Image (tube, rainbow, N blue to C red):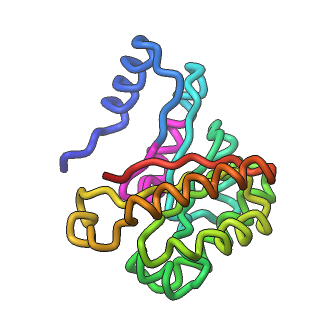
Amino acid sequence: PDELNLKEAIHTIDEMHSLGTQAVIFSGGEPLLRKNFVLQLIEHCDDLGIIPAMLSNGLLMTPQTVLELQEAGLKAVGLPIDSVVPEKHDHLRNVPGTFNKTVQAIKTCLELDLEVVITTMALKDTYTEMPKRIEYLNGLGVDEVAVYDLVPVGRGKDVMDNAMTMDQRVNLIKWLQSQQEDTEMTFTMSGGM
């Protein structure tokens, strides 16, 4: 309905290229619901010298799909892990079974040498789990984590009472900084009030 067709999307990427865009992150919803469309756009970005990346929930990332994404030129994929307790992650994602499928997607991407950046939500009630979460991700071989604070848009508006306190934010930032100094992991943090 209100989605770009392939010709319009390629034209948009061409305009972005003419403006000096250096990277494009495909997200959604779930970009792999339109896999062939996204593969063509990734390839077009790569041909133009624009770095293509993608945010995915990981549920559709089979080994074959990862290979297709790499062949098209995808440089990195962001995958979400919001808790190391599978039931908590699944609850936050609103779909049972997503934790195990996302972990499998992470392993598949890493095995096939596709760069993985984990996106993870820091909430008031999951804040204390962050050390276990980072340790778990490190054990999987992940070396980049983007930590998101709850932002009051979309579904986030309805759950702002789950947002971290300012003290929790400050403590988390300090802890992530110390982990970055002590490990080979890289962290970014965004969002919040």
Name the spot of residue 130 as percent of width and height, x first.
60, 69
Name the spot of residue 155 as percent of width and height, x first.
25, 66
Name the spot of residue 187 as percent of width and height, x first.
63, 49
Q: Looking at this view, is 171 or 129 the one in front?
A: 171
Q: How many marks?
A: 0
Q: Looking at this view, is 162 or 158 the one in front?
A: 162
Name the spot of residue 97 as percent of width and height, x first.
53, 84
Q: Quadrant of residue 124?
A: bottom left
**Which residue sits at x=68%, y=63%?**
106
In the rendered structure, which segment of residues is drawn in magenta? 26-42
Whether residue 137 appears in this view of the structure is: yes
Residue furthest to the front: 167
Q: Quadrant of residue 95?
A: bottom left
Q: Is residue 62 magenta?
A: no
With respect to residue 25, does 170 lie above or below?
below
Whether residue 68 appears in this view of the structure is: no
**Which residue sits at x=27%, y=68%?**
160
In the image, taking residue 5 as reference, residue 123 lies left or right, namely right
Magenta stretch: helix, strand or loop mostly: helix
**Which residue sits at x=36%, y=58%?**
29
Q: Quadrant of residue 17?
A: top left
**Which residue sits at x=44%, y=78%?**
125
In the image, taking residue 116 as reference, residue 30 lies left or right, namely left
Q: Looking at this view, is 9 or 155 the one in front?
A: 155
In the image, taking residue 191 as reference, residue 90 lies left or right, namely right
Q: Is residue 41 magenta?
A: yes
